[in-house]
Image (tube, rainbow, N blue to C red):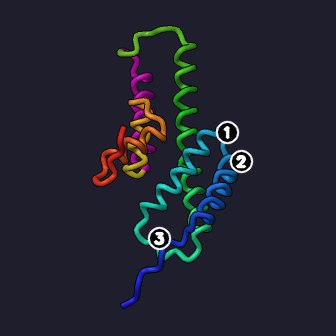
Amino acid sequence: MSRPKPDPLSADAFRGFYTDILYFLRKRTDNASDAADMTQDVFTQWLDYRDRAKVEQPRAFLFQMARNLLRDHWRKQKVRHTVHSDQAEMDAEPVTDEQNDPMAAVQRLQRLEQLKEVLAELSPRRREALMLHRFEGLSQAQHCKRRLQHEPGTEQPE
């Protein structure tokens, strides 16, 4: 019977990878906070990954996770930009009776479908984090603290 390999990320390797990934994401985003959140997400995903002991090149694996998160970030930014642009256009247009305007109704439905598609592409945990941030106003750190408090055996004193 073979023993599972230990987690290939030592504390020193973790610090080095964290710094490298944060730098990588910071250079590719327009927001240091988003880069920090995505870096934290990379390591959260790493800790949740069941087969991490089988990963032979953890640095490459972590950077692939970072690229995937970056791609999701850009996709969300594109949708967010589209929604904001549409809102600005609507704000600039004269007020009309939108309930009787079939074109406005179609455009609203298209935007909703676009948002539903983007949300469907997210993993359940990322979707939950987005919802907690967007609708409950929780930061990444608050979401993590809340999650830790709800997991058995990880109760934190307040």
Disc 1 crowd rating (10 Å Cα; few below 14, some 14-19, many 20+) is: few
Spatial CA distance of label 1 from label 2 is: 8 Å
Instruction: Say which residue label 1 marks.
Output: 30
Residue contact at pointers 1 and 2, CB within 8 angstroms: no
Q: Secondary structure at mark 3?
A: helix
Which mark lies nearer to you, 3 or 2? 3
Spatial CA distance of label 3 from label 2 is: 27 Å
Which quadrant is home to the N terminus? Answer: bottom left
Q: Position of residue 75 (x, y in %)?
A: 55, 45
Residue 32 position by quadrant: top right
Instruction: Say which residue label 2 marks.
Output: 27
- Identify which amino acid the numbered label 3 is placed on: Arg
The residue stretch that appears in magenta: 100-122
Residue nearer the viewer, 5 or 138 = 5
**Residue at image location 57% in from the left, 51% down from the top:** 39
Residue 92 position by quadrant: top right
Q: Secondary structure at mark 2?
A: helix
- Identify which amino acid the numbered label 2 is placed on: Lys
**Residue at image location 68% in from the left, 47% down from the top:** 28
